[in-house]
Image (spheres, coloured by chain):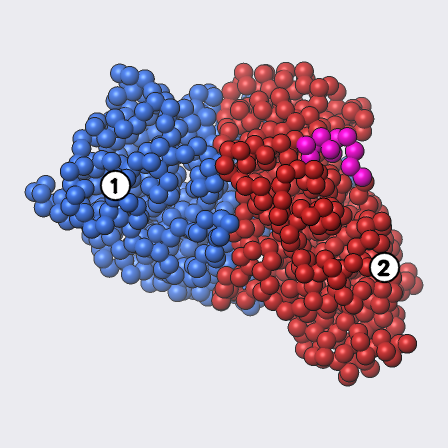
Chain colours: A blue, B red
Amino acid sequence: MLDGVHNDRIRCGRLRERIATAEEAAALIEDGMTVGMSGFTRAGEAKAVPMALAARARQHPLKITLMTGASLGNDLDKTLTEAHVLARRIPFQSDPALRRAINRGEVMFIDQHLSETVEMLRTRQLPRVDVAVIEAVAITENGGIVPTTSVGNSASFAILAEKVIVEINLSQPAELEGLHDIYIPTYRPNRMPIPVVTPESRVGLPFIPIPPEKIAAIVVTEKLDSSSTILDPDDDTRAIAGHLSEFLLHEVRAGRLDHTLQPLQAGIGTIANAVLHGFIDTPFHDLKMYSEVLQDSTFDLFDAGKLRFASGSSITLSERKYQEVLPRLAEYKPRLMLRPQEISNHPEVVRRLGLICINTALEFDIYGNVNSTHVGGTQMMNGIGGSGDFARNAYLSVFVTKSIAKHGAISSVVPMVSHVDHTEHDVDILVTEVGLADLRGLAPRERAATIIANCVHADYQPLMRDYFARASARGGHTPHVLEEALSWHVRLAETGRMA
Amino acid sequence: MLDGVHNDRIRCGRLRERIATAEEAAALIEDGMTVGMSGFTRAGEAKAVPMALAARARQHPLKITLMTGASLGNDLDKTLTEAHVLARRIPFQSDPALRRAINRGEVMFIDQHLSETVEMLRTRQLPRVDVAVIEAVAITENGGIVPTTSVGNSASFAILAEKVIVEINLSQPAELEGLHDIYIPTYRPNRMPIPVVTPESRVGLPFIPIPPEKIAAIVVTEKLDSSSTILDPDDDTRAIAGHLSEFLLHEVRAGRLDHTLQPLQAGIGTIANAVLHGFIDTPFHDLKMYSEVLQDSTFDLFDAGKLRFASGSSITLSERKYQEVLPRLAEYKPRLMLRPQEISNHPEVVRRLGLICINTALEFDIYGNVNSTHVGGTQMMNGIGGSGDFARNAYLSVFVTKSIAKHGAISSVVPMVSHVDHTEHDVDILVTEVGLADLRGLAPRERAATIIANCVHADYQPLMRDYFARASARGGHTPHVLEEALSWHVRLAETGRMA
């Protein structure tokens, strides 16, 4: 069986002699190296080599700088953290164990806009990638690497690395081949326009082109991607989706949009997924997505006949949806495309296409500044991800969150956010289950009035109105009682409740 | 004489009958209207009509929404503010009287990325421009408007407005014609790549193309632009320039840049101008600029043989430099280009060209977040301007400031900025006269260590080290003592000193 597999999956015959065990391949990674691994939103990560590396490190300690596309599945970041392999981690993560190590100051985490990492690598403003480890469904006749369920930063990692390890994952369906569009911008100072002009523009190759001699080892694996951890829509997320649909219908009536809207982007996670899912019950049709992660809702929208095309950098599904979608991949394939995250998130393309961008806030303040990353201003949650790539260049930049958390102990709307990831300049629309605030063309005092009226939970309304009244009396373009601005967060830390 | 002038400057014969007084033209502007006026960094603003409007408003009160490119000269914003004409002001200003009115909450100021205003107008997410008032050196045979010393938002204002008033300014040299490159992106959903691929790419027309019948009035003026208010380099700005040059030379030695660097952008004002001026005494050569405002330093660099080409959206000079440059305009012209601010600042082009962006911070914090706009977190200074368009998409995003202000009462480096315009994600290099912090590839705790060591004034070092030590002991990816994070600003407000 393995021979047949090799012929189909490793079509460049001379590379078959590079087949190795995960341990042998992991031996190419040495202490102090910078390693670029595939994996984006728990999809398509290299699975065997990092585990072998962790096993080795438990015997013979070593540290690496690990770069990926985004978050990894299969508890890889946990295992690597617990084996003390990670000195530095770039540009995103979402693992509880790694998060704790980051917040203890043990792992240096560089939280970057997801479109930027390879730009910095290419200009050698980040350390060179010594070894790339890329999951693939196949290697082509000429040594091209066909990624699996994500592209992420894999293409540039493979191109820029000195050595490449390929994990051929037999569990990833061969039908994934042909889904990818690998385009690498020409290097500065001779950069040409990126030719993507619609979500469905195909501008690159269906594989990562590298000289086959760079492939130092090939490991055959069979482990599945982890399924996503999103929760089903609930009353609050349905209310958020409802407010946004209603607003977009108003935009249609005002003649600013038609029922096909503009291409949609939605951030990872339960709320953004639920909001997209909510489009099923709207009169919008012939929608397109130009997003980073394609979640359950993308396929729900396909199945409901609402969606014409979806471009992303990964496919991350719940276990149930995975079972449904994978057997029907050939059916979805003409309407799907996976791109490098540099292209799925590229400011140039985001601005050109004019996306409606829906991302999740951890908290936002009465002036529209958004915190996406830091609990209490200090504790990293996951990272900014692609939200900054999208929000600044959006046709419409929407942030969503529930108005309260921890059964009301926390208000997601605060006088001043404890950390800013998205400034007031980059936020058009805020939505909680309470309602929607349209900030376009408003000055800060006007923004505060609409945010307080429309987004703040009833339990926090009096406190917030009191704050804003006292701040306004002091004056200023953006009124604050500076010594109280972060007092809600301080109170939470001290008493377990913001109010 | 006027007839000859009309023939040269108003070449579309049938438009000559539209010549009117400023008062007659201003009568086209009614209470409640949205007016788009030329003017960017005190250059090329319409001068007569707004004054006539203010005079009328003193007799017959009226309010308008005023949009411009950026700041206006000739005390226009002051005069309009004092005549209570301004209900809303978009997207930038730098006038003390207007600033006070904004901070009192009397004028609603919408502080926008300078590349975004016309994008929002075009999609009708801001109110439609009723009347555009555009300063011009000439009107072409077909009614095309040739701007003067700035382009700003003038092209889109004229294209989108119902009526256009043109101020033909006889003091603006006729040689300005041919300097402009007016390119308007195709409208979404059919937006094509913006074809600018080098600073000198000429992609548009030398005039603003509008149907001549939209020109409702032409006013002939003679008032000069205001000169810039920048100060000469001093020891501190020379030290800042020195640190940056030294760093860039290090980048050359490391093989990341060559001596022609990448195209340069520098924000408006004394420090950025001084830093650019400092390039005269470096081994860098054959430099190019792709910036928004071209200040004295641009022409100093031309005269020193250092600069090959400069693209901007305006020319704003000191009185002395103005007297030197204007008579030699024909000589500089082949190496100069003025573009709409949407294009000079366009994220797509900024990222493509890979700019080295040098902008001024009001204050920054130990993690590299930058406040460009709000004194004490509440009082608006000028606005974010183009700094966000540039910083996020830069090859290298540099922010400069003196380490202290008000003779040491204020530290420009603080534990936490009181307002965030540029997040840690968008800041690569920070420079004060003390030194330079290279933040690339560093995690927050590492950033803090290098910022404190290299940028903080000696007088504030002990206090800052104490803060960071206590914050670090509490833990977190971005350690803070939250209840003290803004205490320096609070102390300043209460005692007049941060320490």
In the image shown, does A329 or A221 lie closer to the viewer? Answer: A221
Judged left or right of residue A324, residue A417 is right
Would you place residue A195 above or below residue B146 in this image? Answer: above
Which stretch appears magenta? B232-242
Quadrant location of residue B375?
A: top right
Q: Which is more foreground, mark 2 or mark 1?
A: 1
Task: Look at label 1 and name its amino acid.
Answer: Glu
Judged left or right of residue A168, residue B481 is right
10 Å crowding of disc 1: few (<14), some (14-19), many (20+): few
Quadrant location of residue B187?
A: bottom right
> What mark, if any, has residue A213 been given in the picture?
1
**Disc 2 from disc 1: Cα separation:** 67 Å
Asked if badge 2 and badge 1 are on a common chain, one would say no
In the image shown, does B359 or A386 lie closer to the viewer? Answer: B359
For the N terminus of chain B, give its image quadrant. Answer: bottom right
10 Å crowding of disc 2: few (<14), some (14-19), many (20+): some
Task: Look at label 2 and name its amino acid.
Answer: Leu
**Residue drawn 21% across and 47% down?**
A138
For the C terminus of chain B, give its image quadrant. Answer: top right
**Residue drawn 48% across and 57% down?**
A193
Q: Which element type, helix, strand or loop, lies under badge 2?
A: loop
x and y percent of residue A474 in the render?
Answer: 77, 36
The main secondary structure of the magenta stretch is helix
Would you place residue B368 above or below residue A184 in this image? Answer: above
Q: What residue is pinned by disc 2?
A: B224
